[in-house]
Each structure stands twice: as structure tokens, then as C-alpha cells.
Amino acid sequence: MTEKLECFECEQLVEPRIEERKETLPVRGEPVEVLARVGVCPECGADMSVPELDEATLVAAFNQYRSRHGLMTPEEMRRLRERYGLGQRAFALLLGWGEITLHRYESGSLQDDAHNAQLKMAEDPANIRILLETNGHKLTARQRARLETRLREVEGDSAVERTNPFVAREDRGIYGDAVRPRAETAAGFDEVLADFRDKFSQRGEFVLGSEESVRTAVRENGVPVGYGVYVISAIRGTSREVVYIGKAGTLRHDGYGEQGLRKRLKMKQGDVPRERFFPDYIAEQKLDGLHFEWFVTVGEATDTPPFLAEALLLAAHVREYGRLPALNLEA
Ligand SMILES: [Zn+2]
């Protein structure tokens, strides 16, 4: 928080001090208590409204309300949509909604109960098939084809027992996703990422705000010692851009040596320790923060070498955007 704001009490231009306190907000007439970060005037002690913080508090209250009432979170909605390979507008049309309804929900607006029930039904691919019959004409031929392909995969996935995403899938041969005809590797970056979320159950994510310590974030968010991959995205408003894809765990003579995810996320970026690199990068690029998502790929259920998982993500990024993420110098 570096921006100065006018205090409406003492009318001075000040940099608000941030305090954490419990606040109760009404959500649909129901009181919801959240731990809020609020701005306080360092001169006179009056509360100050800081738009980003107020927004974050509202999002936290909505999320608490969601979990209390079994409503899907924006993240769950995004994952559901990506599972079917559709954009926000296309998925909304398929559901028979207005074009921007899903965009609003994925951006944090609280969904109504009827829409929530529909989203839950959409988790079953059989219901998507029904929707495709009634609303398919609202999609382009290309969107329909893509959805068909994804539907077959989703249906196939639930039928085949999976232990390892990239090895021994009957339908894909021993090399799985790693060696496929080009025509079959058309998956966009988001699809590959959605696939990872499906397959690597030991996963997590967190947001690093400006001037926050990655060391603290890694500890507080329980990033494990395990081996795997991680994706760092720049947050600007509601948009996200992948800026780095990395792995933790190098295969040595005697197995995976070196640092696991927990340690790797705190180490150096180039020559600079990440503890300092990330805050500087957020400030330089004028970002709202960085989003970290990590996957343990070498675990009980899956045994995918981190460098293979990393390569699949990097290749999908190049395929979709024609280049590596900004901070990946080579692959
Ligand atoms: Zn003041």
C-alpha cells in the first residue's frame, strides 16, 4: 500500500496504516464475520476507506457465505468451465444464461441459488450433453467441436481408473500425454492447467500481495516439502498472466535430490533472493499481486517427474502464446 489517500476526518493526504480486525458484514441479510484488513489514518486515527481492502473484505465475506450455504466459489466455477474447454461467454450461453453472468460470478459476484444449482448439475457431463442439444446452436462450430472433444475425455476419464496421469493410460499408451501426435496436443495452456488440477490432488494456491513476504506466505499456506511444479501469475485487476513456470526436485543418481516445493519457492530468481525479488517485481510492474499455484507431482497417487510436468506446461504456453512466460529465460 503505497498510495496516499485523503482522510475525510482530518483532511490530510496520508498513507493509511493497515490494521486487521474482525468485522461483521450483512450478506443477503445474514451477518457474516470476517477478519478484515482496514485502513486507518496515521494522523488522526480515523478509519479510512481503501478500495482494494474493502473489496477483499467483501470477497472474504462472500466466500464465507458460500461455504456456509454450499455455494460454489469463483475458483470452482472457473475450474468447472475449463474442464469443458469453454470461455466464460460460451459456457454462460450453454447454460442458457446471459452472456456476462458467468463473468460476473467468476469475478466474485455472489451467485443466486438457482444458478448455483445449475452449475452443480453441470458437473455431470451427461447434463452438459443435454444442454448441448438445447443450447448448442448458440455456440460456434469450433466451440462445439472443442466441447465434444473435452466431453469425450471427461467421460472417458471417469470410466478409466487413474493412478498416473502420464503413464499407463490404456487409451494413450505408455508415454501418455507426453508423446502424442501434434493433432492431439492442441490443448491450450488453461486446459493443461485444468488437467493438472484434476490429476494432481496434492495442490494449492495463494496470493502474494505487495510488500508481503514469500517466506511467510509459503509457511502460512502450508506449501509441502514434496517435488513438483509451480506456476506464478501476475495479477492486474481481474486479469492474470502467467509469468513463470518452475519445478522443484531434480532427478539425481539416487533419486530426487535438492529442494522440494517449500524451499524452492523461497530461493533465488536469477541472482536475487525471491524474498526481495517478488516485492520489487510487483512494484516495478505495478501489479496487484502474484498468484502462486503448486502441484506435487511425485506422490502417492502420481509419479510424474517434475521436469516432465514443467515441460508440458511450458510447451502449452509456447503453443498458445508463441513464447515462454516473461521470467522463463529458456526451457
Ligand atoms: Zn486523519
Image (spheres, grey):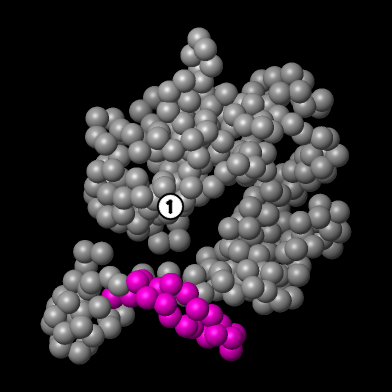
Indicate the quadrant containing the N terminus: top left, top right, bottom left or bottom right.
bottom left
| Residue for badge 1 | 220
In the rendered view, does 98 fall on the left or right side of 20?
right
Look at the picture and state if 178 lies above or below 200. Answer: above
In the rendered view, does 330 fall on the left or right side of 127?
left
As rendered, which of 134 and 192 lies closer to the eye? 192
Q: Quadrant of residue 165?
A: top right
Look at the picture and state if 292 lies above or below 109. Answer: above
As rendered, which of 183 and 128 lies closer to the eye? 128
Mark 1 nearby-residue class (10 Å; few <14, some 14–19, many ≥20) = few
Q: Quadrant of residue 193?
A: top right
Q: Amino acid at mark 1?
A: Glu
Would you say residue 291 is visible in this rendering? no
Q: Position of residue 247 (x, y in %)?
A: 47, 30
As rendered, which of 130 and 39 lies closer to the eye? 39
Which residue does the image show at 20% across and 79% down from the upper left? 41
Q: Position of residue 77 (x, y in %)?
A: 64, 60
Q: Which residues are magenta?
A: 20-39
Label 1: which secondary element? helix
Q: Position of residue 16 (x, y in %)?
A: 22, 73
Which residue does the image show at 63% across and 58% down from the upper left? 76
Look at the picture and state if 186 lies above or below 129. Answer: above
Which residue does the image show at 57% across and 44% down from the upper left? 203
